[in-house]
Image: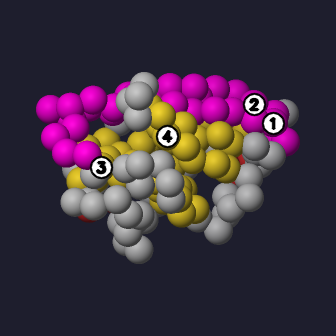
Amino acid sequence: QLQLVESGGGLVQPGGSLRLSCAFSGFTSDYYGIGWFRQAPGKGREGVACINSSGSKAKYAESVQGRFTISRDNAKNTVYLQMNSLKPEDAAVYYCAAVDLGWDIVPEWWRAGGEYDAWGQGTQVTVSS
């Protein structure tokens, strides 16, 4: 059974940093990509970043490019999202999700949340002074 558990959310001032973690388990292949998504109140879900199974490739939303970094430690079964220079508009519930891609890629459709096989419960990020 696939399981993902996010942690690391909290309150941070504008310009500050947070690191989110996504602990995963139950993967049945070696080719699971992991995506980070977010959803703010009254807004749709947005794909933030995605990383391939080996951790060698990543893609980002334009809104976070250069500020957020996704990384992966497969020995610890954990994916991270380092968020720097946070803005009030980054405030949201952040979710990680896993998808079995069959090979070691980040697909062009990585923002399509409906394609993912399992989701975590989310962690709240608040950016406010």
Q: Amino acid at mark 3?
A: Tyr
Q: Which residue, given by chain and number where applicable, does mark 1 sit on? A: 16
From the viewer's side, name the closer residue of 38 and 81. Answer: 81
Q: Which residue, given by chain and number where applicable, does mark 2 sit on? A: 12
Label 3 or label 2, whichever comes before in sequence order: 2
**Is the residue 8 above or below the residue 47 in the image?**
above
**Label 1 secondary element:** loop
Q: CA distance from mark 4 to mark 2?
A: 23 Å
Q: CA distance from mark 3 to mark 1?
A: 31 Å
Q: Which residue, given by chain and number where applicable, does mark 3 sit on? A: 32
Which of the two discs, 2 and 1, sits closer to the camera?
1
Label 3 or label 1, whichever comes before in sequence order: 1
Q: CA distance from mark 4 to mark 3?
A: 12 Å
Quadrant of image for the C terminus:
top right
**Label 2 secondary element:** strand
* Residue 25 as seen in the image, left or right of residue 38: left
* Residue 21 as seen in the image, left or right of residue 28: right
Q: Amino acid at mark 4?
A: Arg
Q: Residue at x 54, y 37 (%)?
A: 80
Label 1 or label 4, whichever comes before in sequence order: 1
What x and y, as percent, mark residue 27? Answer: 22, 38
Magenta span includes 14: yes
Q: CA distance from mark 1 to mark 4?
A: 22 Å
Which of the two discs, 3 and 2, sits closer to the camera?
3
Instruction: Answer few, some or many: residues within 10 Å of disc 3's Cα (few below 14, many 20 plus, some between 14 and 19).
Output: many
Q: CA distance from mark 2 to mark 1?
A: 6 Å
Q: Which residue, given by chain and number where applicable, does mark 4 sit on? A: 72
